[in-house]
Image (cartoon, helix red, strand yellow):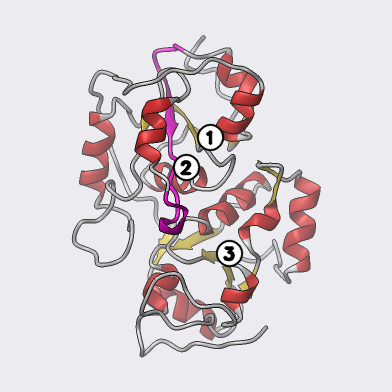
Amino acid sequence: MSGSDWPGTPLVSTAWLHDRLGADDLVVVDASWFLPAQNRDPWGEYLGHHIPGAVFFDIDAISDPSSGLPHMLPPAERFGAEMGSLGIAHESRIVVYDTAGLFSAPRVWWTFRTFGADRVAVLDGGLPRWRVEARPLDGGDAFRPPAFFEARLLPGAVVDAAGVEQALAKAGTQVVDARAVARFRGEAPEPRPGLRSGHMPGALNLPFDRLIEGGRLAAPESLRARFAEAGIDLDRPVITTCGSGVTAAVLSFALANLGKSDVALYDGSWAEWGGREELPVATGP
């Protein structure tokens, strides 16, 4: 298959990927990650079974080692070196999946996009759909020859706490929280110790799982309805946030599938905001 054979959409089908496995410029990436409470080992599961040729992207390891926050974006130079060692070039065709169907893959999709990869997509239905369709699987660690990934940070893709404060203080940009309703309202404790419960005053709430149906991204008309129900105006810019920057990317990914580009992600998310006493917190709806 030609390297120009790229659909140009953030989502690709299992059939599309299956027909192109083995192409030199195509890289399949297992981006599986689990919450600590799930007590699952994504690396061990990858070694047990993965899509043929897939390399493993460790969300926790490929991060900023100087940050006290979980899996923050690494410096561009570090990301480029890590991707090069995995055999991924910035011009590669990259298809990302996870073992949940749609959970952590959008975070890695967003990371690639944030560092300048133009041809990156998420596998529709992830590994569960691939397996239900009885498509081939491999075990062990896949190897690709080293490559060169020229990482460059995309302006406006990521914001910090100050950027969120600025957005909340004036009309225009909407801050949308992907956490569960009970956590957003402060009715349930945060899973990470030491964090306050509640949300950023003025933020909107759209739990990420409302955008998923049967492990797959909901159809565009359903996505539009979910965003509208949450009070989100798709004609205005959006900053997505969550507990630690993983499921916020599901919202960002859904918006990209609706053709929306003026979307940023708050990388620190509630892991940072909820732990800084000087930042305001609201509870309730």
Q: Residues within 10 Å of mark 1 (few under 14, many from 20)?
A: many
Question: Mark 2 vs mark 1: which is more N-terminal?
Answer: 2
The image position of residue 81, as x and y in percent, is 21, 37
Front one among 97 and 41: 41
Query: Pointer 1: what residue?
Result: 121
Q: CA distance from mark 1 to mark 3?
A: 21 Å
The image position of residue 149, as x and y in percent, is 28, 33
The image position of residue 247, as x and y in percent, is 52, 56
Tell whether position 37 is magenta.
Answer: yes
Question: Is residue 188 something that shows in the picture?
Answer: yes
Q: Residues within 10 Å of mark 3 (few under 14, many from 20)?
A: many
Q: Is residue 213 left or right of residue 173?
A: right
Front one among 180 and 170: 180
- Which residues are drawn in magenta? 22-39
Q: CA distance from mark 2 to mark 1?
A: 6 Å
The image position of residue 155, as x and y in percent, is 39, 55
The answer to whether the residue labelled 2 contacts the one labelled 1, judged by CB atoms less than 8 Å apart, is: yes
State which quadrant residue 90 falls in.
Answer: top left
Front one among 193 and 89: 193
Residue occupying the point 49% across, 14% down = 21
- Tell me the number on the disc at residue 178: 3
Residue occupying the point 40% across, 41% down = 112
- The mark lying in front, picked from 3 and 2, is 3
